Amino acid sequence: MPNHLIHESSPYLRQHAHNPVDWFPWGDAAFAKAKAENKPVFLSVGYSACHWCHVMEHESFENEDIARVMNAHFVNIKVDREERPDVDHIYMNAVQMLTGRGGWPMSVFLTPNGEPFYGGTYFPPEDRHGMPGLPRLLEGIARAYHESPDQIRDNVGRLMDALRRMDGQQAADRIPGADLVADSARQLAQSYDDVHGGLGQAPKFPNEAVFELFTRVHHHSGAERFLEMSLQTLRKMAHGGIYDQLGGGFHRYSVDAEWLVPHFEKMLYDNAQLVPLYVDAFRISGDPLFAQIARDSLDYVLREMHDPRGGFYSTQDADSEGEEGKFFVWTPAEVRALVDESDFDLICRYWDVTAEGNFEGKNILHLTLDSAQIAKLFGREPDAVRAAVAKARAQLFAARADRIHPGLDDKVLTAWNGLMISAFARAAEVFDEPRYADAAIGAVEFVESTLQRDDRLLSTYKDGVAKLNGYLDDYAFFITALLDVFELTQERRYLDRAAALVRSTIRHFWDAESGGFFFTSDDHEALIVRTKPSFDGSIPSGNSAMARNLLRLHHLTGGVEFRERAETLLRVYADAMRQQPFGTANMLCALDFYTQTPKEIVIVGSRDDPATAALLAAARRVYVPNRALTVVVPDGSATLPALLEGKGQIDGRATAYVCERMTCSAPVTDAAALTLLLERRA
């Protein structure tokens, strides 16, 4: 007999629809039942690709005896954190206050009014490793709820006070200077792992915004250390097991310090954030490895995460056939059966495939030697090694395709699609790849046709149904996507749509009293608190993304109101940037944009003129972290930026200007001359 999740669209909720637990989705019906029966609420939050969520389901939520306890003493609510990040944010904050850590599955106990009083993450089915078993915990919580109401009220009061205080930032008197960006980067660099790259030790996450910050600081200062940290980390990740050596794309994170053993889920947002880092690394270094990783990751998304209508799916599971990573690992016998016998030893050495294995007796493919080193070791030419590896990769990939694939969460989220649209747009600029441009434009059209209603966004789409009010992240990342597609296509309509959505975001999300954007709109479902995201998590905070959007729009349109709103954000989060640079790395990138000011690149030329195309290609080849790029057709139909009034083409030729800090360069008509202008450090 299915429970109340059977009619939900979320794949994660549907996974639990046949549990013996009487699950409810988040909503009025569950809380009304809790009030009517005077029962506490057990809230379980997770997502479909989460390995430990599956473990807790199999151990506890499929257990008839445990389900009987849950149903007798609690009203049980299951939430997909990807569909309801508003709910997840609130109760994750509470769990972190209670335990000092967070994660999924998240388990929280609430009053019938939704107020938290106890919580944690994964609980085993019996006492284990110092953790209470879930049945004992359930019995204790139920007893305390009814027998110790004063203690419950005290817990609720303290947690609610803390939750209300969390987002109470006071705006600073002034915006921090560029020295804060550099000082923060130096502070973050103290956590750098000089051996394996990345920050800290195990577990190790990509921390994309931190490495973008490092690359920016190198660009402005010339300090090679920051570039070395970024490039080394990207190389180590590309060679590690966190990267899918056969199919492209990155897994969520590494459980070790060496990037070898990942949690095998693949998230759209990780790949969307990593691709631009690899694109920029290629622009800076010219190393073809970075271009190849970016291309292979995007090709993976197009192959496996692309909805036929144009959007991008959310996640791929860590598990297949009930085992974590089974789809991705190999034995020597499996490799031997597929590759040429003459190449077997070479291929095993290249991907470190051994009899003992590196993951539960099997092998996660990763690189310990490059092609040149393998060539020397086996006495072959490097080109021959590369050919053998390419052939083996194709053979293994084809065989892997016949395995049972990990589960796919095929819902489309506006926020994560915004991130991926930006990745495709930025790659299309640098690689001049029409497929990537088509993917970016097609996804914009998908969001606008299915998830946008006038100037409002919905958050999620599945099986032909779009629903849920858009969150700040949906607006922020889709606006960024529109700006990136504008700079790719130079079609004004994308810029106009971005500006319209920014104004809508201000109307419905802005905190008129203290400044900053709330996570939910003014017409959203009322929750126990209205959060205002300050810190980056697995994706950047919506406020930091909006700060960058506002600054870009100011420089692309001249709109002073956009700059002023961004300045307010930078003052509101000034103390947070000083105190917690790791959690505000993306806001520090916004501060870098503001303090360094962008290069405003204007190309005056006809769109079909090869000379215009040459200047545009030159502008896109150079790494310029802070940039506003506009092509103006010299027919009087477009208004030149104020700095360029009275300026135009030289002798009727496509002409480029680079303006910075209210001063414009002399006009150039040669791509090489434009490159030299752009390579000058700020």
Image (cartoon, grey):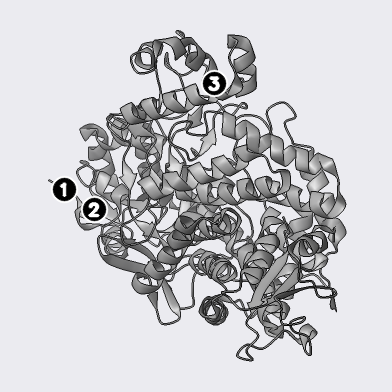
Q: Position of residue 54 (x, y in %)?
A: 34, 36
Type of amino acid at the residue the image marks with label 1: Pro
Residue 325 visible in image: no
Q: Secondary structure at mark 2?
A: helix
Name of the residue lying farthest toward the front? 651
Residue at the disc numbered 3: 385
Q: Which residue is at the front of the view, 591 or 94?
A: 591
Image quadrant where residue 468 sits? bottom left
Q: Evaluate if marks 1 and 2 touch, with contact meaning CB atoms under 8 Å apart.
A: yes
Give the residue displayed 49% in from the left and 74% down from the top.
Answer: 521
Q: Which residue is at the front of the view, 615 or 104?
A: 615
Left-right relation of 72 to 617: left
Residue at the disc numbered 1: 2
* Separation of marks 3 and 2 at Cα, in angstroms: 53 Å
Q: Secondary structure at mark 3?
A: helix
Frontmost of labels 3 and 2 is 3
* Separation of marks 1 and 3 at Cα, in angstroms: 55 Å
